[in-house]
Image (spheres, grey):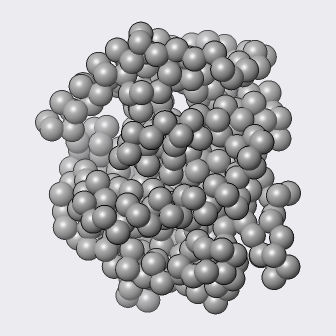
Amino acid sequence: MKRKATRFLLSIGLLSSMLIFSSCDEEPIPLYDRQTPVVTINWAATADSLQDKTYDVFLSTDGKYFVQNNTGNTFFNYWWNAHALDVLVDAYERTDDAAYVQRMKALLNGIKDKNNGQFPNEYYDDMEWLALSSLRAYDATGDAAFLDATTILWTDIKTGLNDNQGGGIAWRKSQLAYKNTPANAPAIILAARLYQLQEKEEDLELAKTLYTWLKSTLVDPATGIVWDGINRTGNGEIDKNWLFTYNQGVFIGAAEELYKITGEQAYLSDAVRTANTTMNNPELSPGGILRSENQGDGGLFKGILVRYLVRLVEQPNLAAADRSKIINFLKYNAETLYSKGIHRPSLMISPDWKTMPGNETDSSTQLSGLMLIEAMARLEELNLLG
């Protein structure tokens, strides 16, 4: 009941802010070629169906983790399963169905079991994804096991801090001189959320320090586009040609979390600029639809961006014009996916949200589309879809 009351107050606050704030500083996103028919869609019911199908199709036979794909590859992907936990939290927050708590707990234990009986692994970004989803699970359930996992992971994640490339957290333990956005922006979000929970000043200071390094090193000062990494091949260069949707998303999330704590407008302005640039970028969002980044790891990228765009939409001090642009963008993507990118009756999701999937669907790709549908159910619940 507490979560439901909080949501009601949030929706009232958001609606009030939409009447108060307005902004015309950014160029409007392009008019979309709406070939997708506008229909009334029950987003919550669609999310329920996709949750059940995803769990049935991709859960391993031992019930411990989500497998690689729907055609027999049972490989365990640590960070994909971290996002599977996040998606289960989405469902529980929306439905209050205790069955999702059981699934969440089983998945957390299964990830540990498949990872040689421990939570830490080689990759700092992998651990951050699991720490974030575990912390959300703790916030939703109050089950200390989820917070314990987050604490173990956070302690290990901080061993990746070093002065190579001027600061930041390394991507992996065996490559400490390579720094990238996926290992730093989620760490900022995690540190900020832990500060909000536990009020440890060192967590907030670390979040700010990492943000300063990330913005000055891997964010284009002219556009707000977020680059992937620096010194990947040992030459000290930035991978400006590696442009991925999820890097934009986690930077938006990092900025929004710090704005929430500090109230400093610069953070919110950073988040809005990167969001607007992403929605207008022809490489990232051709024709207003987030591009296909294929399957495998790339299958998850768009869903991560969507998650943090929704967090930005929920920020009460976001200007009404910016909120409207993001909601319209998400709605257009979701309507397109609903009509063109979900096969029926299998309910498998395509990596290209405007075309039907092939015979093989990776769980990463399925989860990404499910994140979008859950996002729409969330906006629908907050009465923000119009």
Q: Nearer the viewer, residue 15 or 140?
A: 15
Task: Describe residue 331's horizontal placement relative to residue 4 as left or right.
Answer: right
Q: In the picture, residue 260 is in which quadrant? A: top left
- Across and down, in percent, residue 326 comes to 58, 27
Residue drawn at x 45%, y 78% as measured from the top left: 158
Q: Classify 205 as above or below 248.
A: below
Asked if one can make out residue 185 in the rendered structure from this viewpoint, the answer is no
Q: Classify 42 as above or below 293.
A: above
Q: Classify 8 as above or below 363.
A: above
Residue drawn at x 58%, y 50% as measured from the top left: 251
Q: In the picture, residue 25 is in which quadrant? A: top right
Task: Describe residue 33's horizontal placement relative to residue 336 as left or right.
Answer: right
Q: How many marks?
A: 0
Q: Nearer the viewer, residue 386 or 52?
A: 386
* Quarter that holds the N terminus: top left
Asked if one can make out residue 8 in the rendered structure from this viewpoint, the answer is yes
Residue drawn at x 31%, y 37% as measured from the top left: 94
- Across and down, in percent, residue 228 comes to 72, 61
Task: Describe residue 296's horizontal placement relative to residue 250 as left or right.
Answer: right
Q: Which residue is farthest left?
A: 1
Q: Classify 74 as above or below 159.
A: above
- Across and down, in percent, residue 318 comes to 47, 27
Residue drawn at x 47%, y 59% as measured from the top left: 208
- Across and down, in percent, residue 203 comes to 36, 66
